[in-house]
Amino acid sequence: MTDTVLIFGYGFIGKAFADRARASGHTTIATARDAEKRASLEAEGLASVDPGDAQALAQAVADASALLITPAPGDDGCPAYASLEPHLKATSGKWIGYLSTTGVYGDRDGGWVWEDSPLLPSSTEGRRRVLAESQWRGLGQHRVSTFRLPGLYGPGRNVIERLRDGTARRIHKPGHVFSRLHHDDCATALLAAMERRTNDSFNLCDDRPAPADQVLIHAARLIGIAPPPAIAWDDPALSPATRRFYADNKRVSNARAKAVLGWRLRYPTYVEGLNAIWAALLP
């Protein structure tokens, strides 16, 4: 079965998913408010739609058998929900994938979380995600899956390139770990969920939660430079958003995604992921 999938929010992971979906024979429609970006998408062979054009958006929803929702929520929840709900309430049977974050679990003092763990967000951003998840799960006439994502990396967004351009910071908090995921592995899981028409929640992350400074040190060794000096996570010179990020400490299980989706990671840890990125950057 091939799908027409509407990608609401064509950014880093939206593009990775679109590339994977198109390679598997699916048709993609991407939203873009900017006319120049829509023209660029069309030149790449992707249909595009202005999400501010209610009539065009309604037609895109009608044409789509699946939707992937990527924008970050605000205080009122997911902005895509506000735009799409009027067009979805009159239909049924579509698959909807909503990209959430592992921030919904809050701080677990380094302990493990699973999809059925209580949602105890410790930040405003996490609480917004919980609200957005509930909005999408409320569309009972559709099959809705939520994907709780960690830090995503890949070509163009990774610690190797930040080290090379001098913007990387080595932030240290004793005992702190977090999960991450290569964007290609994320796209593979999303595609598997769409093709299986899942109606569930999934943690998508790699197999090794690890300290951020450990990842940076590996990247520095890989490219042959000295890592920058360590900065304490609670240094007042760091932004409040950065300090909030390091306030949460947990290990995230990906067992359900592997079992239900048949998902196998191409980059099971940051080592394989960064090694591949560096190999691609070498002349």
Image (cartoon, rainbow, N blue to C red):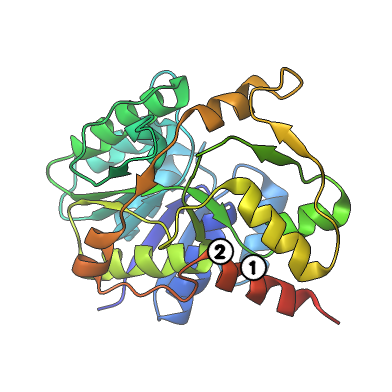
Q: Is residue 236 left or right of residue 147?
A: right
Image position, residue 66 (x, y; %): 31, 59
Residue of label 2: 270
Give coordinates of residue 39: x percent, y percent.
Answer: 68, 58
Can residue 58 be seen by looking at this rendering? no
Amino acid identity at mark 2: Tyr
**Res. 81 mark:** none
Q: How many marks?
A: 2
Tell me whether circle 2 and circle 1 mark residues in contact (CB < 8 Å). yes
Mark 2 surroundings within 10 Å by alpha-carbon count, few (fewer than 14), some (14 through 19), many (20 or more): many
**Residue beneath disc 1:** 274
Q: Position of residue 261 (x, y in %)?
A: 24, 69
Residue at coordinates 35% horizontally, 75% vertically from top-left? 264
Residue at (81% x, 79% y) in the render: 282
Q: Secondary structure at mark 2?
A: helix
Quarter of the picture containing the N terminus is bottom left
Placement of 252 over or under 122, stated as above or below: below
- Specify the quadrant that holds the C terminus: bottom right
